[in-house]
Amino acid sequence: MQDAGSKLEKFLVQAQEVLMDLGMDKERFNERSARTLLSLAHMDAESSWADATNDMYTMRRLMDWMRDRLGQDYAPNTRETIRRFTLHQFCVGAIVEQNADRPDRPINSPKWNYRLNPNLIPVLHAVGTDDYELRIAEFLGGVETWRQQQAEIRMMNKVPVELPDGTGVMLSAGGQNVLIKDMVEEFCPRYAPGGQVLYIDDADHSFRTQQEALMASVGIELPEHGKVPDLIVWMADKEWLFLMEACSTHGPIDVMRKCELVDLFASRKSRLVFVSCFPDRMVMRQYLADLAWETEAWCASDPDHIIHLDGERFMGPYSYGVVEPDE
């Protein structure tokens, strides 16, 4: 016969699996969350899943159940952790209801309570039976899970970028990516018309998987070592390779960085165009003294203008030791 400790361990594992199936994320199907689910279902080592109920419990009663019946005496200051990082997400994910007896209860009331969604009880009763998959599917058919809602929030926080060919990629929010969006959508049509974006730093997974193939399609390999530029664009009609750095939070293409890029892209070193991009002229002024000669500087705030730093042509590649015929 299975002892109480072993049975409880089995329940905890099953509770974690149920939470995973209900669309909770990793933080919400840990052992703490599993104990919370079992407490809400009023289950202990003497119970079975068929005994699960959905009575209403205050936070204090839930903590007492975990201590007295589930063998976990959480410290008093853990109460807020369970409330904020487990119960809150259970509510958002339609697993738990708050104050079913009085929805307008004041937030500071000691009678604030939680209960399992009544529609979840058939799922719990079916754990370990042949009906479980059907009951899970029925439940999920009427809710938007926590994981789904989190994915939508992450997508809302992404920066959408339209490539020159009309397709789109998503960049994570913040950092350099607002400027990179301007580089793709504002710089490229003006100064690299018809150019193909080969590489964008921090692009979403679907585009990252294409980048190596795109580079190979024009005979370029991504360097195994060394920092790749923020944006790489291939202008096929002139066979120019634009190596572009977004300079909103770090420096531009200075002499050292220019030498690094020439070495990294040695197979195309006679076709390289270097562009340091800034959000505006105020930021650019901080780096003017560092800009390497024979490079370009561009500000997203003034997209129709570009600054060329010396050289024998307005914009274009230089040979860097390779003898090229006059264009």
Image (cartoon, rainbow, N blue to C red):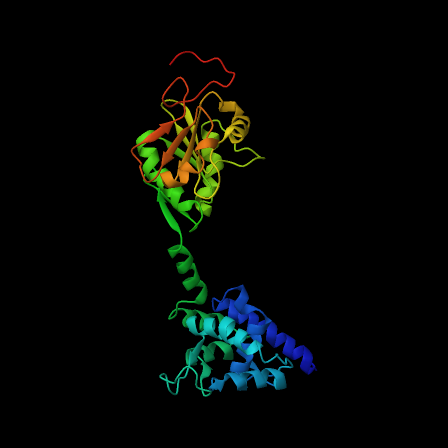
Where is residue 49? Give x, y as percent.
Answer: 55, 80
The quarter in which the N terminus is drawn is: bottom right
Q: Is the residue 181 above or below the residue 86 in the image?
A: above
Where is residue 36? Give x, y as percent.
Answer: 54, 77
Tell which of 280 and 53 is nearer to you. Answer: 280
Q: How many marks?
A: 0
- The residue that appears at 63% across and 81% down in the rendered structure is 73
Q: Is the residue 227 above or below the residue 133 in the image?
A: above
Tell which of 155 and 257 is nearer to you. Answer: 257
**Quadrant of res 161:** top left
Judge whether residue 194 can be spotted in this image: no
Where is residue 312? Give x, y as percent.
Answer: 40, 17
Tell which of 320 and 71 is nearer to you. Answer: 320
> Taking 312 as reference, is 5 left or right?
right
Q: Is the residue 145 above or below the residue 315 in the image?
A: below
The quarter in which the C terminus is drawn is: top left
Judge whether residue 310 can be spotted in this image: yes
> Taking 271 as reference, is 223 left or right?
right
> Taking 226 as reference, is 111 left or right?
left
